[in-house]
Image (cartoon, helix red, strand yellow):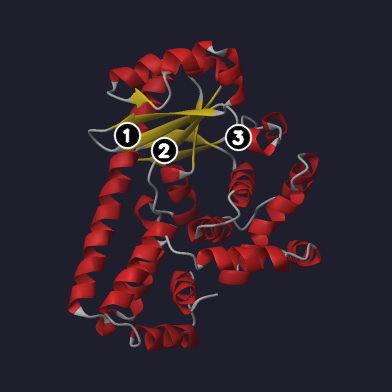
Amino acid sequence: MTPDIQFIINCCNSMPTSVEIEVIRRSCTQYNEVQWLDIIDRTLYHGVFPAFNHCLQNNVKDLLPDNIKTKLSQASMDTTMQSMRLTGELVQINRQLNGMGIKALAFKGPALAKIAYGDINQRQFSDLDIFIKRTDFRKVIPLMEAKGFQALFPIEKFIYDKVMFEMNNDCGFYKQQKNILVEFHWDFFRKLAISTDKFAPWADTETIVIDQFEITTLKPETHLLYHSLHGSKHVWERLFWILDLDRFIRAHDNLEWDELLTKSSSMGAQKMFLLGIALAIKYFDTPVPAVINQRCQAAKFENVIAYVENEFGQEN
C-alpha cells in the first residue's frame, strides 16, 4: 500500500478516532502543492472524493494551503452539479417509464448514494444504471431518442441481430449536450456466467424517495450482493466500490446475512461475495457478524488482496 493511498483510505473512514485524525493531520503537513493535486486527482479517479473532502473540511481545514482549498471547492462543486444533473435525469426517466407501464429498477448511481450514504451528494457517480425486462428494451429506444439520447450501438443492427442482442446484457444511451450516460440492463452477470434468475432482482423490491419521487430499487440484501459481485468482477481496482460496501452495511444493521450466504452459494459466487466484504473489513473496519468475519478469514484472500493493493498504486 502506497502512503498516498493509505492517506486517502484513512480520510474515507466513516468515524475516525482522535488518534486517526492526528495521523491524518501529520500526513497533511508533508505534502507540497504538486503532491496535493495528485492526491485529489486520485480521489476523483477512485470515486471517493466526497468522503475524502468531507474528512478534510471537518478535521484539517486549518492545515490546507489556500490554493488547495480552492481546488477542493471546485472539485466539490463539479461533483455536486454532476450528481444533481444525473439525479434529475433519473427521476424524469423513471416517471416516463412508469407512464409507459415499464417496470424498472434503479441501482448504483443516485439510488446507491441515497441508500448507503443518505445523501446523493456524498457519493461520486458518473452515469445512470436502470434494470428492465429484456422484452421492454425495444419500448425504451423511442423514449430515449425523443429525449435527445443516442444509442452507443448501431441500434437497428443491435436489436435485430439476435446473436448480438442475446450476447449482451445492456445498452447505453448518451446525451452529448448534458454529458449524461444512461445504461439499460436486462441481465446483471452475463460476463460472469452467473444466473440473473437465481439473483432474483424482481423479488421483494424496495421503494426509495428521491426528489419527492418514488423510485423502485433492489431490496437491501440483493443490492449488497450485486455490488460485491460487481466489484469482484473488476478485481476492486477502484476504492469507491469498497467504500460503498462499508457505507451500505453501516446503513443497514438488520441485514439477513444467512440469506446472503445462501443466495451467493446457490449462484456459485459466495467467495466473490465474501471478497468484497473482506476488503471492507480490512480497509474500513466495517462491522459485520462474527460468522461473516470468520468466513472471510477462512477464505484466505491474502494473495488477492495483495494484488488489489498493487493495482491501487498504479497510475490513473
For residue 48, side relative to residue 246 (left or right) = left
For the C terminus, give its image quadrant: bottom left
Tell me the tag on residue 174.
Answer: none
- In terms of sequence position, does the residue under pointer 3 or pointer 2 come before the other? 2
Q: Nearer the viewer, mark 1 or mark 3?
A: 3
Circles 1 and 3 in contact, beta carbons < 8 Å: no
Q: Quadrant of residue 167?
A: top right
Circles 1 and 2 in contact, beta carbons < 8 Å: yes
* Residue carrying label 3: 188
- Residue in the picture at 60% in, 63% down: 308
Q: Quadrant of residue 280?
A: bottom right
From the viewer's perspective, is residue 138 above or below residue 218? above
Mark 1 to mark 2: distance in Å?
9 Å
Amino acid type indicated by mark 3? Phe
Circles 3 and 2 in contact, beta carbons < 8 Å: no
Element marked by disc 2: strand
Q: Nearer the viewer, residue 248 or 229?
A: 229
Residue 240 picture location, percent across and down: 48, 58
Q: Nearer the viewer, residue 137 or 107?
A: 137
Mark 3 to mark 2: distance in Å?
15 Å
Residue 180 picture location, percent across and down: 32, 36
How many neighbours does mark 2 have within 10 angstroms: few (below 14), some (14-19), or many (20 or more)?
Answer: many
For residue 270, side relative to residue 314 (left or right) = right
* Residue carrying label 2: 128
Q: Quadrant of residue 70?
A: bottom left
Element marked by disc 1: helix
- In terms of sequence position, does the residue under pointer 1 or pointer 3 come before the other? 1
From the viewer's perspective, is residue 10 above or below residue 311? below
For the N terminus, give its image quadrant: bottom right
- Residue in the picture at 62% in, 47% down: 233
* Residue carrying label 1: 89
